[in-house]
Amino acid sequence: MNFQAEKKIILNFYKSFQNCKYDEIPSVISNYYSEDILWRGFHPFNEKKGTKELSSEFWQPLRKSFVNLQRRMDIFLGGINTLSPNKDIWIVSMGHLMGLFDNPWIGIKPTKKITMLRYCEFSKIDNDKISEVAMFFDIPHLMLQAGIKPFPTETGVSLVQPGPLLNNGLLFKKQGVTKGLKTTKIIEKMIKDVLVWKNFDRDKIIKELKKSWNEDMIWWGPTGIGSTFTIERYVDQHVQPFREIFIDRTLNKHICRLAEGNFGGFFGWPNLTLTPVKKFMGINTKQEPSEMRVIDIYRRDGDKLSENWVFIDFLHFWKLQGIDILNEL
């Protein structure tokens, strides 16, 4: 399968939404989404059910807050959900939503300046309609652009993240099967490695990572952790500190996992349940289990992975820890 028809549906939706007026948004949403659409997003949006709720509580407020909104994609791919017995087809889009932040949004004061909202979106296609969506944002990164520092510390660095090194992430054309199968295989291997990782020793962690990752890998992490470059810095600036903070980690089932060409990824709702035993991001924790909703997107180079774009709903995580970041604005 080449997913061209499904990709066309998504691209037509993007074009229609881009060109429509504010009061035409509900009509556009109804034209492209199933009436009983299940939409999942980061806190405070969480789950939306049905086109009316989705239009009035997400898309219309977003368009009102960010004037001249543009979708600037860096990665676009399609694939069969390898976790589904029904062989569902999903389309993935990743990049930034860019606009002029002219009106308040979820309690964040506008800047009247250009703003980039980092996003990744998984869309399931059924009967020529979008029937299920996971659309995750890096809202804390938008807060930084608005002059708000939501978290005291991070081990990496937050920045406006670019697309793939080779600028080859927009898979508008047919890709064939072989490359996608190879990408799926290495992602599956990496997941199995994560399931058995028990090491806290730096050298052993580096050795394990080298099984699935190229030396010059880039981990494009969310605000609160930040991004890091090369295996050694990835260990120092994320993996080792993260493992020392969290215990009793449980990997929950993913909802969708797919690959096409040299790109692939997955999402869960939630992906992880884990317990912090010390401060995280410079904030005291309750030392009780919390969930992490995550999207991961990967770029394969050769036989290993080279780039990973990560979206984690830290607003939801901290709310479960008794801290409502948005209410403190």
Image: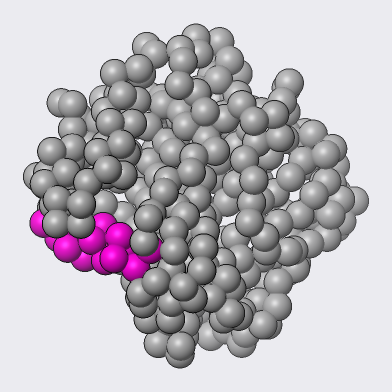
The verdict on residue 56 being magenta is yes
What percent of the width, then of the height, locates residue 144?
59, 73
In front: 97, or 267?
A: 97
Left or right of 5 in this view: 136: right
| Residue at screen point 61% across, 66% down | 223
Q: Residue at x 21, y 65 (%)?
A: 57
Number of numbered discs on residues: 0
Q: Nearer the viewer, residue 34 or 250?
A: 34
Residue sitting farthest toward the right: 203
Numbered range of the magenta stretch: 51-66
Q: Does residue 194 appear in this view?
A: no
Q: Main secondary structure of the magenta part?
A: helix
- For this view, does 302 lie left or right of residue 86? right
Asked which colour scheme the image uses, the reply is: one colour
Image height check: is 176 above or below 272?
Answer: above
Q: Where does residue 19 sit, x and y in percent of width and height?
A: 27, 43
Q: Position of residue 260 (x, y in %)?
A: 50, 22
- Residue at 51 percent of width and 63 percent of height: 115
Quarter of the picture holding the N terminus: top left
Picture quadrant of residue 239? bottom right
